[in-house]
Amino acid sequence: MPRTLTAPAPSPPARTAVPPPRRTRVLAAAEARRAAAATASFLLALALHLAGAPPWTWLPLYAAAYLAGGWEPARAGLRALRAKTLDVDLLMIVAALGAAAIGQVMDGALLIVIFATSGAVEALATARTEDAVRGLLDLAPATANRLRADGTEETVATAELAVGDVILVRPGERIGADGRVLDGAGEVDQATITGEPLPVAKHPGDEVFAGTLNGAGALRVAVQRDASDSVIARIVAMVEEACETKAATQLLVERIERRYSVGIVVATLAVFAIPLAFGAALSGALLRAMTFMIVASPCAVVLATMPPLLSALANAGRHGVLVKSAAVMERLGRVDAVALDKTGTLTEGTPRVTDIRVLPGSGLTEDDLLGWAAAAELPSEHPLARAVVDAARRRGLEPDAAEDFASAPGVGVTASVGGRTVAVGAPARVLPSDGGPLTRRAAEAAGELEALGRTAAVVVLNGVPAGVLGVADRPRPDAAATVAALTALTGTAPTLLTGDNPRAAARLAAEVGVTDVRAGLLPQDKVAAVRAREAAGHAVLVVGDGVNDAPALAAAHTGVAMGRAGSDLALETADVVVVRDELATIPRAIALSRAARRLVLQNLVIAGVFITALVLWDLLGHLPLPIGVLGHEGSTVIVGLNGLRLLRESAWTRAGTAGPPSATR
């Protein structure tokens, strides 16, 4: 189950070049060292013990394992006991010491090692999440160039910027605060905020966000939000808030576990004391109480849940789906609504040339047109330029050398190639104003491509339009099949949540079979959409890959991150990571989770029948201790083996043919 983030609050946002050490990281390292020491001592003692060495060689090593792994949990348990709480840490220590007292030193040491290792893994996971959130805060630059009233510059910490300040952002610099462009033009890569695959042209009056990268052109920006209220800071706050909300469920589970432990202790004492009060023999009462404690032990109940979920988790992991815990695997099967990000999730995340339209009368072939455009774009670092050059090279065309290269943000590029002047750019910017036939045809072709959701780039040779290129982010090959599978599993079609423009979103949705499209969303808008579905009673699965998706991943019932291109924060925030970037594995993982939940229910019924029968036998009759142990251990073995069925390859294969919810729940 997701754990509470211990990330720093976004305010105050002051930064240093190197973040100061965090207490969580220190604690995690200490827990890892203690777990490692306990494990090493235990393994060495076990080797000596099994080799028949004298007790004086291995007993001290077992004792070292007890101390290394159990000292801190024992202190925590005693502190909880002083607060009138029966902590599971203390029960673990008592059980281990009890095992040692009756000669089962090795069993007690193994219990200590398993408990210490589990605690270390949890602490390290929490520390990594904190580091990811702090890394997000560091996306915004530490300093900014603030303009004084007389027009001169001063370098100040971004934390000192106030609403109304004016900052200068040069090409290649990150924007220091949320604001609005006053002067200048540029192309800003804001994929971290909106998920858009291409940089967005910015002109006076346009909004910009802290942490986004200005690719070309200088901008003068008026600050409109304090650093503590920037979109980046709010993303951190939303991730933190959502994870804390989920942690409340974990606290409830821990309270139930503590009460059950107290109940078993109280019931055992009652089974021992009540017969004594009515004159029963001490030995008989003690034997009945011991038998009750054994048969009432929830081992089979615990094992009823974990083997199916862990088997499903391991099976999914073999196929590239990392489910972060057994609790997440169980929760995954309850999903009945899905929300999908666009760029990098349903699409490949890399712009590609999809259309090459040569204008009649230009005398060029498609390769000619692409070759001229690639030569002009070769010196450019713009993603659209890289798409054109890559398309040419895939056709075996090596772009010629260009001279007199020039680039204008939001306009395009011009260069001299082979004695010709080549311009490639936005139709409204590079087309001649003569209104001639070729100009009209180029404008019409560009309009058709833009209506299809492409980004149109007109190629002009010596002032004459020669053709139009269409660039788009292609859908993943398995996107349509995945959407169909998710629809069949949940009973409702997925929703598309994207920061991209409505036209591009609608075009992709039509290709993959999504009908509910919500475009132009900022991170907080995605969270609002997810929470609205949750408030309507749905368990929402969110699939995304970028920093801008992290709050929605955290707010959702279950969050899934695409692993190959996913941001660190998305990977840490998500409950599930698709390591191999295979979108089609997501519905399979859901179906596998539902199969695990069915096995959990079967196992709980088996465990409940055994425990109830044995307890009633012991209380109402005379249950021999050996039969009680046999029944208890037998039920444990049965539910354990039943749960391991999901380790088989056939379980994953069957998950690929799972039906709608009515057939799986």
Image (cartoon, rainbow, N blue to C red):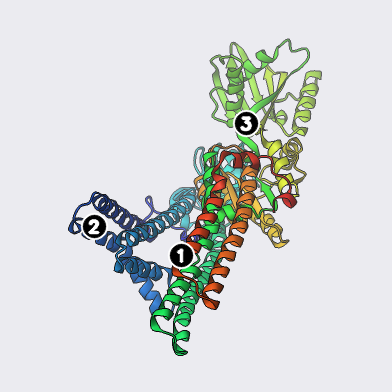
The numbered mark, 2 or 1, whose residue comes first in the sequence reads: 2
Q: Please name the residue that numbered disc 2 is placed on.
A: 61
Quadrant for residue 100, please give it.
Answer: bottom left
Q: Nearer the viewer, residue 458 or 403?
A: 458
The numbered mark, 3 or 1, whose residue comes first in the sequence reads: 3
Q: Secondary structure at mark 3?
A: strand
- Indicate the quadrant containing the C terminus: top left, top right, bottom left or bottom right: bottom right
Q: Is residue 506 visible?
A: yes
Going 62% across and 38% down the picture, which residue do you hit? 653
Q: Please name the residue that numbered disc 1 is placed on.
A: 629
Of circles 2 and 1, the one toward us is 1
Badges 3 and 2: C-beta atoms under 8 Å apart? no
Report whether 501 appears left or right of 37: right
Q: What is the three-letter code of the residue carrying label 2?
A: Leu
Q: What is the three-letter code of the residue carrying label 3?
A: Pro
In the depicted structure, whether residue 479 falls above or below residue 106: above
Q: Position of residue 640 (x, y in %)?
A: 52, 54
Q: Secondary structure at mark 2?
A: helix
Quadrant for residue 483, please give it.
Answer: top right
Mark 3, other Cα within 10 Å: few <14 / some 14–19 / many ≥20:
many
Q: What is the three-letter code of the residue carrying label 1?
A: Val
Report whether 429 appears left or right of 50: right
Going 51% across and 74% down the picture, which residue do you hit? 618
Q: Position of residue 624 (x, y in %)?
A: 46, 70
Mark 2, other Cα within 10 Å: few <14 / some 14–19 / many ≥20:
many
Going 68% across and 59% down the picture, which residue do you hit? 534
In the depicted structure, whether residue 540 falls above or below residue 274: above
Q: Nearer the viewer, residue 485 or 114?
A: 114
Q: Please name the residue that numbered disc 3 is placed on.
A: 351
In the depicted structure, whether residue 403 falls above or below residue 321: above
Badges 2 and 1: C-beta atoms under 8 Å apart? no
